[in-house]
Image (cartoon, rainbow, N blue to C red):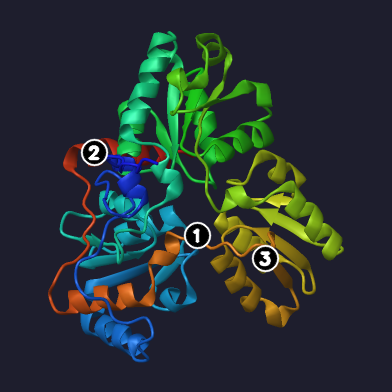
Amino acid sequence: MTTAQPLDVQPTPLALLLLGREADPRSERGVECPGDLPSPSDPDLVARARAAKEKLGDKVFVLGHHYQRDEVIQFADVTGDSFKLARDAAARPEAEYIVFCGVHFMAESADILTTDDQAVVLPDLAAGCSMADMATAEQVAECWDVLTDAGIADQVVPVSYMNSSADIKAFTGRHGGTICTSSNAKRALEWAFEQGEKILFLPDQHLGRNTAVRDMGMTLDDCVVYNPHKPNGGLTAEQLRNAKMILWRGHCSVHGRFSVESVEDVRARIPGVNVLVHPECKHEVVAAADHVGSTEYIIKALEAAPRGSKWAIGTELNLVRRLANRFADEDKEIVFLDKTVCFCSTMNRIDLPHLAWTLESLADGKLVNRIEVDPETEKYAKLALERMLALP
């Protein structure tokens, strides 16, 4: 019997990254924050964060995205979706520090829209976005080469969702495109089709497909999905030439969980329920729902809903739970569309210990976790954002 010899296997960089033993500096994940955080069980944490914020006074402006935990949202000066918050930050030039309780791409957008004298701070640098991570600058540049080889690049106008990195926004600006939100996606696509014959929609395939088919009357056959992990995106030149919408193969990890079965199940459990979902959900889920709209649309719909109405909401759980508590005294029954509890894991990285540490550091004159977009990237990303702002 022979003794097996140990294999000399060297782990790949990807394997090390998955094991948590390395970090990818180009990614929005896997970045550690310096310094010692307070314990999450510290009973004085709320008081510490409040004291630091009061000490800073008008020097700090805290933004809270709708998907943040209640323990964080209580410290927000304003709440909203990603673009609303970025615009709110730009409207506060007297604030020296903009503390963005959201994720990385949101803080980048705030940095692009604020002045050079303001510092945008993200309490936890590891708060990224899985959707934004699904489209890198290198992948999108390669995609453009594929479109060029197919002879259609001069017909294509890029439209990028706000939920994208500054690099992708800059790519969009360089190639004559615009940014969109889930609220104005239809208008952005209409504008883009006035500029060219085809659209490259980045990085969320579902918002692009739902807007094109549900809101603009296109067919599913007008859409193709470009997969950056396959040669030529997994598409032939003929498929690209025939398509009106070239959708990037990206999605939201939270909204992608909702299914037609979720809709059927909640209808069976709660007779008379209204199903309201975000357009980042899959096309079949949007088709099965009663109402579809952005985060702000969802909030306004529930505000206007009659007493005693019943709602199943297909969006991030922190917001759904907050809305259920808010409208409980109006006898509005508000439930999460999926039976499985599913928070946005990267949004939830912004917790009270990180926020308290950030505010205390700033109060002590120590700038931490600043998000800065380089001037060249900022120039073209801002151009794309300004094209969106100019939309009627």
Up-down: is 206 above or below 94?
above
Q: Where in the figure is residue 179, as x and y percent of width and height?
A: 42, 39
Residue highlighted by disc 3: 302
Image quarter for residue 336?
bottom right
Horizontal relation, residue 225 to residue 23: left or right: right
Q: Are marks 2 and 1 in contact (CB under 8 Å)?
A: no
Image quarter for residue 363?
bottom left
Q: Are marks 2 and 3 in contact (CB under 8 Å)?
A: no
Q: Earlier in the sequence, mark 3 or mark 1?
A: 3
Up-down: is 391 above or below 110?
above
Residue drawn 53% across the image and 63% down it = 343
Horizontal relation, residue 2 to residue 23: left or right: right
At label 1, the amino acid type is Cys
Depth check, front residue: 42 or 325? 42
Q: Secondary structure at mark 1?
A: loop
At label 3, the amino acid type is Leu
Residue drawn 66% across the image and 51% down it = 258
Horizontal relation, residue 278 to residue 392: left or right: right
Q: Please identify, in this view, whether the residue under mark 3 or under mark 1 is nearer the observer.
A: 1
Mark 2 → mark 1, Cα distance in angstroms: 27 Å
As drawn, the label of residue 344 is 1
Residue highlighted by disc 2: 377
